[in-house]
Amino acid sequence: MRRITTLVALTLVLSSAPFFDPGAGAARVWTTRVVPGDGDAIAAISCYSATKCVGVSKYSREVITTTNAGNSWVVHRPAAVGRYGFTSVKCVVPDTCLATALLGAAPTVGGAIYKSLDGGQHWYLNFQEKTPRNAAFKFSDVTCVTALRCLVSGTNGSAGFILHTDNGARSWTRARLPAQPRAGSILGVDCAGLNECFAVQGARATVYTSSDSGRSWTTLAIPNNFSRYETNKDTPTGLDAISCGSAAFCVAGGYIGHVNLQGTSEPFKWVTNNGGRSWSFTNPFASTGAKTPSAVSQNAISCTSREDCTMGLFYGYVYSTTDAGRSWTWEHAAPQSDNDVLSVACLGASHCLFSIMSNFPQRSVFAGRLWLER
């Protein structure tokens, strides 16, 4: 994956506030707690009803489930799952979940797909690809339109790929993708309907679209005013996450790397309100000054309707829109500090669950926390 080679350890540089005005609006209540069980950060959370959600650990085999919208969680440690952590999870009715994970360390490097039929309580290995000579291989994201139709994205270190199934993950087929950039990686993938899907490229800011449920893909045009970054070797770009609230409204988030500015990265968002035919880009979005290879995590955008979307950034910034991305509000009451938002899962416009991880952990290197916003 093409990333910023000069980036160093996660260190906050001077940048005290976002550029967007917080604005008015109803006050929201935020609560925070440590991750139950082993306390390791949660890589992704997926909610598939008004009360049921599943979270998967970033660094262990732990799975957490809730049936009361995040007020309390139950810990599971399925023996069938490897101990090296998950990358993403997606659950759909009826209680069906797929999760992508790291298969292991050398010599058993590779990626795995796990499946649960009881809302995350029990899991079995669905598919695996062992790549002992290729540590760069990774399954990155998973999305499902129905319990039968799902997509998994990833990279083999040289190019991104997408797997699709329409038989409930009994078999997987490689999708047809456009030519990939050097060190390509398909990070985020989401569907806006039964057949319309989107995927984002991590090695260069690009959105792909499919109209046949993910079997074949084409490249969409970037926003006109974003081209100045794409043509500047000192500002490498990439897209990390995408979420669609309707067939028309989707939000993609990524990074602009500033190689000559202490190796910092700046988050940005693209918004479409016409199903991807065109995308808008407004800069600046926020100033986190993150010294990281990214600024938006892969699972950190959650759009829940044709108007509502919430996204989290590095260093704990949270933004939301209730008008299909035309304006965004900085959620200044969020427990910002030095936390990076790893995952956002919203049950509605004003009820979201967040998984976060501190840049400066005190209790454990991998320790995480959960935020609940109402």
Image (cartoon, rainbow, N blue to C red):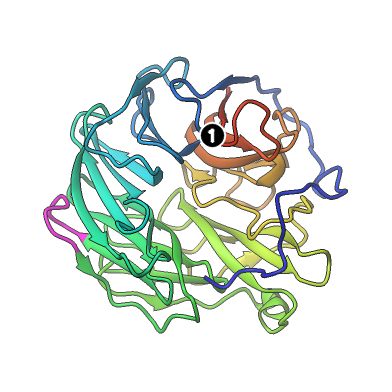
For residue 256, above or below residue 116: below
Q: Give the left or right position of residue 331, taking residue 95 as reference.
A: right
| Residue name at image x 43 percent, y 51 percent | 246
Q: Would residue 34 be found to the left or right of residue 345 on screen?
A: right
Where is residue 267 shown, x and y percent of the image?
68, 57
| Residue 69 falls in image quadrant | top left
- Principal SS element in the magenta part? loop
Q: Is residue 231 left or right of residue 13?
A: left
Please tell me which residue is depicted at 35% across the width and 39% down the height of the picture.
83
Could you tell me which residue is drawn at 78 percent across and 32 percent down? 24
Q: Is residue 344 magenta?
A: no
| Residue at disc 1, secondary structure | strand
In this rendering, the answer to whether 161 lies above or below 295 is below
Q: Residue furthest front?
A: 107
Q: Residue 338 lies in what quarter of the image?
A: top right
Total numbered circles:
1
Per the image, the residue denoted by label 1 is 355
Q: Quadrant of the C terminus?
A: top right
Q: Position of residue 37 (x, y in %)?
A: 43, 21
How packed mark 1 is, by other alpha carbons closer than 10 Å (few <14, some 14-19, many 20 or more), is: many
Which of these two is toward me, 82 or 354? Answer: 82
Find residue 299 and report its horizontal and vertical position in percent.
49, 47
Q: Tell me where residue 125 sits by quadrant.
A: top left
109 vs 176, nearest the viewer: 109
In the rendered image, residue 168 lying in the magenta stretch gets the answer: yes
> Is residue 282 shown left or right of residue 262?
left
Magenta stretch, residue numbers = 165-172
Identified by mark 1, the residue type is Ser
